[in-house]
Image (cartoon, coloured by chain):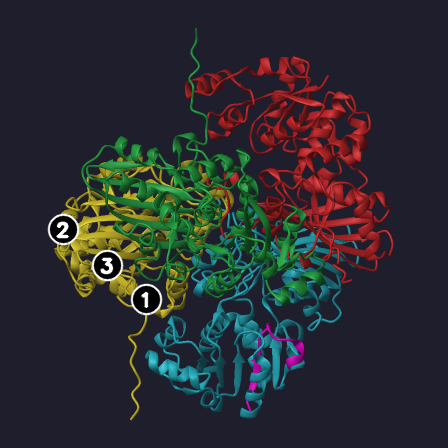
Chain colours: A green, B red, C cyan, D yellow
Amino acid sequence: MNVQVAINGYGVIGKRVADAVRAMPDMDLVGVADVTTDWRVRTATERGIAVFAATDEAGAAMVQAGVPVAGTLAELLAQADVVVDTTPKKVAATNLEVYRAAGVKAVFQGGESHATTGHSFVAQANYATALGRDTTRVVSCNTTSIVRVLGALHDAGLLARARGVLIRRATDPAQSHQRGIMNTVVPEGSIPSHQGPDARTVLPELDVVTMAAKAAHTQTHNHFWTLQLTRPASREEVLEALRAAPRIAFIRMADGLTALNTTVELMGDLGRPRGDMWEVAVWEDVLTVEGDEAYLTYQVNNEAIVIPETIDAIRALTQTIADGATSMALTDEVLGMRREFLPTPVPVTAD
Amino acid sequence: MNVQVAINGYGVIGKRVADAVRAMPDMDLVGVADVTTDWRVRTATERGIAVFAATDEAGAAMVQAGVPVAGTLAELLAQADVVVDTTPKKVAATNLEVYRAAGVKAVFQGGESHATTGHSFVAQANYATALGRDTTRVVSCNTTSIVRVLGALHDAGLLARARGVLIRRATDPAQSHQRGIMNTVVPEGSIPSHQGPDARTVLPELDVVTMAAKAAHTQTHNHFWTLQLTRPASREEVLEALRAAPRIAFIRMADGLTALNTTVELMGDLGRPRGDMWEVAVWEDVLTVEGDEAYLTYQVNNEAIVIPETIDAIRALTQTIADGATSMALTDEVLGMRREFLPTPVPVTAD
Amino acid sequence: MNVQVAINGYGVIGKRVADAVRAMPDMDLVGVADVTTDWRVRTATERGIAVFAATDEAGAAMVQAGVPVAGTLAELLAQADVVVDTTPKKVAATNLEVYRAAGVKAVFQGGESHATTGHSFVAQANYATALGRDTTRVVSCNTTSIVRVLGALHDAGLLARARGVLIRRATDPAQSHQRGIMNTVVPEGSIPSHQGPDARTVLPELDVVTMAAKAAHTQTHNHFWTLQLTRPASREEVLEALRAAPRIAFIRMADGLTALNTTVELMGDLGRPRGDMWEVAVWEDVLTVEGDEAYLTYQVNNEAIVIPETIDAIRALTQTIADGATSMALTDEVLGMRREFLPTPVPVTAD
Amino acid sequence: MNVQVAINGYGVIGKRVADAVRAMPDMDLVGVADVTTDWRVRTATERGIAVFAATDEAGAAMVQAGVPVAGTLAELLAQADVVVDTTPKKVAATNLEVYRAAGVKAVFQGGESHATTGHSFVAQANYATALGRDTTRVVSCNTTSIVRVLGALHDAGLLARARGVLIRRATDPAQSHQRGIMNTVVPEGSIPSHQGPDARTVLPELDVVTMAAKAAHTQTHNHFWTLQLTRPASREEVLEALRAAPRIAFIRMADGLTALNTTVELMGDLGRPRGDMWEVAVWEDVLTVEGDEAYLTYQVNNEAIVIPETIDAIRALTQTIADGATSMALTDEVLGMRREFLPTPVPVTAD
């Protein structure tokens, strides 16, 4: 029988998890809980998703607003094996008790602390240690990308030390009328920024320091890395290590993909839902290796990258699939994840 | 037999026309012609669309770059009944001769002048006069929206005079790394801006004046109108006139759709390809009527709004469907166009 | 003896009023009160302005932070004839009682309601009715510009009806790292927006309706107007009416001043403090008259335009100068206000 | 007798050099040459600066436009000892011949290559080697900042290796209506970006690599550095090395200076002309030292930082002042450069 999944919070992440769960052959979406009555939750209804009221007050407001309410959060949880908590930051600690009392496993997101669950998850790094746990935390978009890319080089025995600068999007498109920054850059007020240490909750052996800043755009993050290698290596060796790891795709300036917006447009052209890019997009032709140092830049779709990880986390907690590689392969196939976004050039030969 | 359609220019409009043509039951897409070799044209290949070289030089470069080239523009035209010209502004006059020589009908876009074709097209206004013509011009995004909305009020006998201010997006997302404006507004240098007069190429009886400015955003235009009515009217009468016309959808501030970005997000949530909104989105709860004046604001997706019009123009030129209403109904159904984006609230009753 | 002026609130408006008061020959700045301890208030100290603590808590925090505190708000008021209240919106009602108790006259800003003071002020329109009053309210930047421009045409007997669209800056540059909008336009949720009705608190006879939207920039507003004239008029007549009114300056697209940022840059080039433009900048070569309708667009520096009005309001309340025209002339001369920003072209003649 | 200075190009840099030259007690500004006829060159006339025509065509157009033309470029050069070339990139090579033929020394800007002059200039690093030369090149804004900051640590014997990420402003405010990027980040297409190697034209012994990206803002650059020190050091040692070097000022997040726009606003509050910041602003309370690594971030006003360097370069070429430190001290005093922008907090003591 399929895993029964509940989602608490139908926002930027929650709605994407809902789509992904519905696409998976081994999962059923029981419904989503939320507290709003506006267009956001009403698109869930529009798409045939059962909407539950996360609180009694919300339920009354939803009924008042004409949103068909399928029941309470408790009723949602009663039908679920696992809940994905995509509520705003810092309410998870309270929710955790609710989930425990309901006897459902819970997947939290990166806005919560490692301490909340005691386990932080990136599928390629530690699926095995999440097996059968009651809870885990899928780390944030930035941290997920760091673990994917630095983890790939670490696994290849190439990485000694990583120093990164993260140019973050200031806010999400759906919120950009209410908050955001304009015509400025906002550097994080302390070094290291939290992403580097956070990556070590998944891969403690990484020697990683990050600095971060918010820039005046809404779509996707852009990371720049200086990597101290364990030894002098060739550019091809570094590329090979990245190619060997999952959920990294290559893009190229030479293809005209020269800025964050071009890749966003490409996702739309490929027919991706909401223009989502679940892969970390590494600029292959910018990657440079000089002696024992490597330099690279990549792009992270902060709205989408944790979706496949969340799907895998559901399977790990519920032990639906015992092996991380198998789960990842299924997730990636169903979502349509790729290693290259463009067809390999096949030169036409004259005959 | 289905109409055989060629597209010359695989850019912002061309790629959307390609998708729409492929979706229509009475049309086949023969292929697209372009001059680039970068990711944009390669996504056509990726999606199974035959790519032709618009020029000999482009063909050589494409072959060099590994893009599978299906043939020349001439070869593309030879297989087509009609070509949709979505090349950049101001090259259409030259292309027109090519299309004439090839014996194919041609649909141009709003970047061209009315004089080029002698006919300007908006389906609801003048489908009939385009029937069997060799060429027509689908007017620009802004002008299309003006004809739809003002035309609706004109048809209802309500509109005496319209004065509009158009806050335009500065550039398209796909181009926003190369050109655009930053932290400023750029007013058009003369009044009236061209959109008002252009609407009169379709509806000569409109008394319309527009002023325009580019603002610092990339997605969708925002129009504000002061309308002198022919007589004092109720708000409901004005709304009724808009409801009676096709391709206008209502949105509401009360639903949380309070800014351009929220509607863009909604389209993604509804699963629209590329987040496209083909309808003019009129804010129902902002529309105000005071005596014999009405005031309203609406949102226009400049990348998408002309797509259904282009499909109808193909049918009008080729006389596939003799009746505009029938063509529009087919187009709208296949694309999934709507009058309301959210489910009508159905209050839950206690029993 | 000079008028003794206190300022409560050293923010975007308060710091500019401080500079202007210090420049006026008939005024002395006693000091400014504020509640912050950060760089903003410390620049006051840096510039030799006495800083008072607006509250006891603020005073303690300032002392703690090393800001030299000259005293309490009560002590500041005790030395002042008039206070300019530039505190954030909606606290004025409370402050009003404090000022009354201290026996000082008070000038409020446009964030407050007309009802708070019972008098709304624009120097050219109603200086006389403010003479000797205890309080007045300098209307907001947008409203001030409306009264200046529409008032000019009204005084010339030309204006029957005005319908405007205001493209507002989303937030001030000093706040743009904390709040703002990104890549969107936010239309006001109701029509008319408040600026039109607000202009009628100064000029009740205006027939004016405004619609407004916030666009994604931080500097200056851009207004577009459709004006119904009382009779067919020539373009020169309309220009002449504007030339006859104070505090309006002409700019021209033909001079390369084609967007809001160019005028901002021009102010810096002219050596204006903080790049301030106190005048309404009307695009002379965009202004169009067709029969009995006129169309125009102008730019409003929201941080600066109310400064001269505030200076005049101080004089009106304190009856330092009995005549509005005399006060305005003095203000304008001291600030260096202009009717043209560029030297009149003087063709070089060959001899 | 004062050095007679000509400026060729009255744009973003040229107009600032003009102001600085006029402020210096040992320099006279003969005039500026340009090719435009619009508001930019007319503000020169407005401010009493003689305008020369850089070309015959420009001269004719200026006369036509009513700009008083003082003569030709040749006539300007004939009166000058030295010319500052602030023309657009890549025309300097041609101009160099003109200057040589006229027998005037020439200071170029960072848009030109090192090879053009054979000498690249940052006052604190190599004033002495520019003494009496015919030409030099003041390096770009980014490179100047790198030499100032890394040079300071190098001089202190602390710097082994520097790896930087530069978040650049996309375009200048004066150009932001015509070109720019919107809602994206544009990474440089290759690593290293040119700024690191360029710093070595001044300080060849630096081990420096830079990556760069353009972000969607118009004002000032933001650099992030990972520094390998020669030995474990304390934070205070690193700060001390920076304090010992000229033209670096400290700012602090704790003062509320938390983003690029806040510092820009501060410059206006300090009464700086055009809001210029000639110093590199290093965030003191963000600077972090861990063992033998240091991390820091600073802000660079790209329009202003090279102005003092240009003044010093004029003196070095013309040997007005033989000693770099003396020249820099004079420049800094006249401009009003500072090491701290805010008054040192003086705790008020209760007695």
Q: Position of residue A145 (x, y in %)?
A: 38, 46
Query: Which kind of residue does numbered mark 2 sit on?
Result: Ala
The amino acid type of the residue labelled 3 equals Asp
Inter-mark Cα distance, 3 to 1: 36 Å
Secondary structure at numbered mark 3: loop
User: Does C121 appear in magenta?
Assistant: no
Q: Which residues are magenta?
A: C103-116
Q: Quadrant of residue D19?
A: bottom left
Label 1: which secondary element:
loop
- Classify mark 2: helix, strand or loop: helix
Q: Report the residue that reaches farthest toward the front.
A: A1
Residue behind mark 3: D26
Q: Nearer the viewer, mark 3 or mark 2?
A: 2
User: Residue C114 in magenta?
Assistant: yes
Report x, y in % for residue B303: 61, 38
Q: Amino acid at mark 1?
A: Arg
A170 or B107: nearer the viewer: A170
Q: Where is residue A220? Give x, y as percent.
A: 45, 46
Residues at marks 2 and 1, CA–CA distance in whole angstroms: 34 Å
Could you tell me which residue is drawn at 39 percent across and 66 percent down? D266
Of the two numbered discs 3 and 2 on the same chain, state the one appearing first in sequence. Answer: 3
Nearer-the-camera pick, D278 or B316: B316
